[in-house]
């Protein structure tokens, strides 16, 4: 009777397979890789490698046991493929599909939200519902960028039932992948969207109303907390406050309107 391969062995085998085959199933030698265009000002020279802080390493200790350490060997395409059939936490039981992330892989600006909602779960892309349309307006009409200029991801990649807050074991399962996304994109600024995302990134219980508007740091990268677009839809009077947060982001990136 054969012994099933461990999760670590399965991931290593997948990495080797991806080394020969692209995500679309074609040999890499037959594919023409798209060139990522960055319409923003030329980014600064590469920053020194920053040692991973304990902020999310602590939450990922459980996931390390099922091969999460190998995530450091993956690029964005490989991670997307590995996560397509992810079974690392119970969120897999109710999802339609994994919602990985989208945008410019060399973006200077990255947005991080909580997790997929119903529309995102159906379409496989973060922030595509009403809250997503508002986020797009904030990026394009407010900041003068294109949505494709930035990178958008979530703390967890699968929709929690009834849009509840993700639980600790679910955060632990996804934490290594979010950290790897940040490390690969290397944004100059991260915008944390909403209470849950910001409290998770900063490992704090401080209210979002007290965190927003002030600069913080995640894994060596400046982080600006602001209100989640879904909250702004319910409380339109706070849009002015969120705009003040984004103006600080624009100033740090040297953007002008």
Image (cartoon, grey):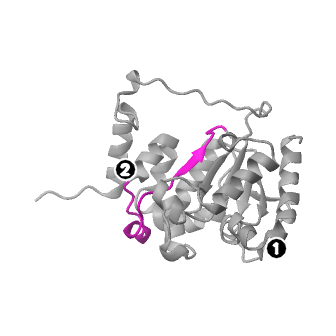
Residue 175 x/y as whole percent: 55, 61
Pointer 2: what residue?
11
In terms of secondary structure, what is the magenta stretch mainly?
Answer: loop
| The one of 114 and 126 positioned closer to us in this rendering | 126
Residue sitting at x 79%, y 48%: 141
Q: Is residue 178 above or below residue 45?
A: below
Res. 213 visible in picture: no
Residue 32 falls inside the magenta stretch: no
Q: CA distance from mark 1 to mark 2?
A: 40 Å
Q: Which residue is mark 1?
A: 209
Q: Secondary structure at mark 1?
A: helix
Q: Which residues are magenta?
A: 85-106
Q: Nearer the viewer, mark 1 or mark 2?
A: 1
Q: Earlier in the sequence, mark 1 or mark 2?
A: 2
Q: Is residue 46 above or below residue 232?
A: above
Residue visible at 47% across and 63% down in the picture = 63
User: Is residue 84 found left or right of 126 in the rendered image?
Assistant: left
């Amino acid at each position: 009777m054969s012994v099933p391969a461990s999760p670590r062995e399965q991931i290593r085998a997948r990495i080797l397979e991806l080394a020969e085959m692209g995500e679309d199933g074609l040999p890499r030698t037959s594919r023409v890789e798209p060139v990522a265009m960055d319409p923003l000002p030329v980014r600064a020279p590469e920053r020194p490698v920053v040692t991973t802080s304990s902020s999310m390493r602590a939450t990922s200790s459980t996931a390390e046991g099922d091969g999460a350490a190998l995530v450091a060997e993956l690029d964005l395409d490989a991670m997307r493929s590995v996560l397509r059939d992810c079974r690392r936490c119970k969120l897999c039981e109710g999802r339609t599909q994994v919602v990985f992330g989208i945008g410019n892989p060399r973006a200077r600006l990255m947005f991080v939200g909580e997790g997929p909602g119903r529309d995102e779960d159906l379409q496989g892309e973060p922030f595509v519902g009403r809250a997503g349309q508002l986020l797009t307006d904030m990026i394009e009409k407010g900041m003068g960028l294109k949505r494709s200029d930035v990178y958008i991801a979530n703390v967890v990649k699968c929709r929690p039932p009834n849009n509840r807050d993700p639980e600790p074991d679910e955060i632990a399962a996804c934490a290594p992948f979010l950290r790897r996304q940040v490390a690969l994109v290397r944004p100059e600024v991260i915008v944390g969207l909403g209470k849950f995302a910001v409290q998770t990134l900063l490992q704090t219980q401080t209210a979002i109303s007290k965190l927003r508007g002030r600069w913080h740091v995640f894994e060596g990268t400046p982080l600006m907390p602001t209100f989640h677009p879904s909250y702004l839809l319910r409380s339109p009077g706070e849009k002015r406050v969120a705009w003040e947060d984004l103006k600080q982001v624009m100033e740090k990136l040297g953007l002008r309107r």
